Image (tube, helix red, strand yellow):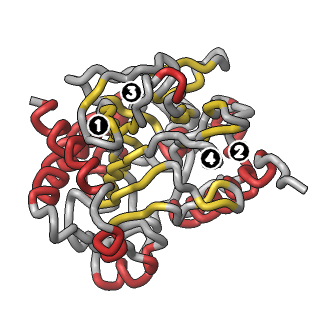
């Protein structure tokens, strides 16, 4: 069953995040822009390193995805896996989980194709695209307890999006596990003590709501590329992760664990809307003031997925700088 696939991976995150610093350093991979192995404090929120969470990235479909040429040309998109020697059990559990998530998403892609059969000019063949891809990235996330001075708190209060800021997924489909909460000092599994802590989304009416994924379920999130190729028939959902308020944790340092898996296309895939669709049809469906406008990043019809991601990284960086509070004098 699903919990037999997701729970072993999630429960290994505590051990992984608390490996000795020298062990974690061996898992870092700068040539991939830290998109393989361990990353903590390498991403930035504005101009500040993000220490609110640690990420372990892996490709569940292949330890060396793509061709030698692909990996050399797109090291950030198709890096080789790096596994911790101290945790030999991690690889098998991660690969099994990620492959199951990929399989669910490719079936969902076929259903999208069926719904789009009467849409003039739809040509993406999402089911086939996701079946053949090796661009698949698992991200085992360990959210460290919020503490004063890090991005998860503002003036002593838990920030609305302190663990992960408001964003849309930029790719095609994202599979999501339920989350786990642990005592960061002991690794003991605990209940989430804060009803406001966890994954939040923006609904179609523009209001934000917290989402709880049941322990025996997997959720799937639509990315902006799917919004483009379906002409706005499917819409990317803005989301963030809110930290746990220390005032509700009864003195415990609460950490959160989750493992999304991003199923995407090769970086050279052209992002083309259906021929009978207008650009404004795509852009108007997903307007939200919480994320940078899609039109700023999907610069023209047919831009490659890789170029779109590059534009997205740059725009989110600029966006986070604008949102960052000014430094103290």
In the displayed structure, 66 sits above or below 312; it is below
Q: For label 1, count other residues whose C-alpha is less than 10 Å away and answer few (under 14), some (14-19) or many (20+).
A: some
Residue at image mark 1 = 110
Badge 4 marks a residue whose secondary structure is loop
Badge 1 marks a residue whose secondary structure is helix
Horizontally, residue 61 falls left or right of residue 174, namely left
Closer to the observer: label 2 or label 4?
A: 4
Q: Residue at x 56, y 37 (%)?
A: 231
Q: Earlier in the sequence, mark 3 or mark 2?
A: 3
Residue at image mark 4 = 151
Residue 115 image label: 3
- Residue 269, given in percent of the width and then of the height, sits at 46, 62
- The residues tagged by marks 3 and 2 sit, at their Cα atoms, a distance apart of 28 Å
Residue at image mark 2 = 292
Q: Residue at x 63, y 37 (%)?
A: 282
Q: Earlier in the sequence, mark 2 or mark 1?
A: 1
């Amino acid at each position: 069953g699903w919990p037999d696939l997701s729970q072993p991976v999630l429960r290994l995150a505590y051990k992984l995040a608390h490996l000795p610093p020298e062990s974690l350093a061996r898992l870092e991979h700068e040539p991939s822009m830290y998109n393989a192995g361990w990353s903590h404090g390498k991403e930035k929120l504005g101009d500040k390193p993000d220490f609110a969470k640690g990420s372990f990235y892996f490709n569940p479909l292949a330890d060396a995805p793509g061709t030698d040429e692909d990996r050399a040309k797109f090291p950030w998109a198709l890096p080789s896996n790096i596994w911790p020697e101290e945790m030999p059990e991690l690889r098998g559990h991660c690969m099994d989980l990620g492959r199951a998530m990929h399989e669910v998403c490719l079936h969902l892609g076929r259903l999208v194709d069926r719904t789009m059969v009467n849409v003039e000019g739809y040509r993406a063949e999402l089911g086939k695209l996701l079946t053949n891809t090796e661009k698949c990235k698992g991200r085992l996330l360990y959210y460290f307890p919020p503490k004063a001075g890090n991005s998860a708190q503002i003036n002593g209060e838990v920030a609305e999006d302190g663990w992960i800021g408001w964003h849309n997924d930029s790719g095609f489909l994202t599979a999501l596990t339920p989350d786990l909460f642990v005592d960061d000092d002991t690794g003991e599994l605990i209940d989430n003590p804060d009803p406001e802590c966890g994954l939040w989304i923006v609904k179609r009416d523009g209001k934000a709501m917290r989402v709880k994924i049941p322990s025996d379920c997997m959720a799937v999130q639509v990315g902006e590329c799917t919004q483009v190729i379906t002409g706005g028939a499917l819409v990317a959902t803005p989301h963030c992760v809110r930290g746990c308020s220390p005032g509700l944790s009864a003195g415990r340092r609460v950490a959160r664990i989750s493992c999304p898996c991003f199923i995407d296309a090769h970086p050279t895939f052209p992002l083309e809307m259906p021929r009978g669709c207008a650009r404004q049809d795509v852009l108007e469906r997903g307007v939200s003031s919480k994320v940078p406008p899609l039109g700023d990043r999907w610069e023209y019809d047919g831009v490659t997925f890789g170029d779109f991601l590059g534009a997205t990284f740059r725009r989110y960086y600029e966006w986070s700088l604008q949102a960052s509070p000014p430094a103290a004098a």
